[in-house]
Image (cartoon, helix red, strand yellow):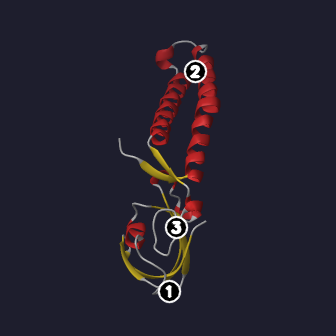
Amino acid sequence: MEKIPMTAEGYASLEKELKHCQSVERPRIIQQITEARTHGDLSENAEYHAAKELQSHNEGRIGELEDKLARADVIDVSKLSGDTIKFGATVTLIDEDTDEKKVWQIVGEPEADAKAGKISVTSPLARALIGKAKGANVEVLTPGGAKAYEVKKVEWR
């Protein structure tokens, strides 16, 4: 059973989603199924089949979340430090082509969210950054082509 690294914040987020699926979505879907059953013949009852499909999706998500939480290796980023980039680091990069500044935190796969500035430790950018320090130049092969960055800052938040 392979461990999944994640921050305490990411773990709490998955726990919150699991509780929501179990205590809010599950009873709501059961209620929908119960109501749909009262509408007669189940073989031609679209509401019933839609509710059963929802139930299947929700139960699948619950299983997936339980698995991720069971395999979680929670890493307290506040206790990490150092000058080299590793899991949990918040890195400020300057795009060498556009001089655009980007700030990324390297997190576990389940909590990665590019819009929130969190990239997966398994992403091409994170893999290129791991082990580098402030001032390093990093080249990354992205789907859009090669990108070059300069590491401006390494922080632990």
Residue that appears at 63% across and 25% down: 27
Q: Please, what is the three-letter code of the amino acid marked with disc 2?
A: Ile
Where residue 2 sits in the image (x, y, percent)? 36, 45
Q: CA distance from mark 1 to mark 3?
A: 23 Å
- Quarter of the image where the N terminus is located: top left
Contact? badges 1 and 3 (CB < 8 Å):
no
Q: Which residue is mark 2?
A: 33
Q: Earlier in the sequence, mark 2 or mark 1?
A: 2
Q: How many marks?
A: 3
Q: Earlier in the sequence, mark 2 or mark 3?
A: 2
Picture layout, residue 93 above or below residue 14: below
Camera-near label (2 vs 1) is 1
Q: CA distance from mark 2 to mark 1?
A: 54 Å
Picture layout, residue 41 above or below residue 138: above
What secondary structure is found at the residue carrying circle 3? loop
- Does 135 sit left or right of 128 as displayed? right
Q: Nearer the viewer, residue 125 or 155?
A: 155
Q: Which mark is residue 89?
A: 3
Q: Which residue is mark 1?
A: 98
Where residue 50 sits in the image (x, y, percent)? 52, 28
Pointer 2 local density, CA inside 10 Å: few below 14, some 14–19, many at least 20: some
- Quarter of the image where the C terminus is located: bottom right
Where residue 149 sits in the image (x, y, percent)? 44, 81
What secondary structure is found at the residue carrying circle 2? helix
Q: Is residue 18 visible?
A: yes
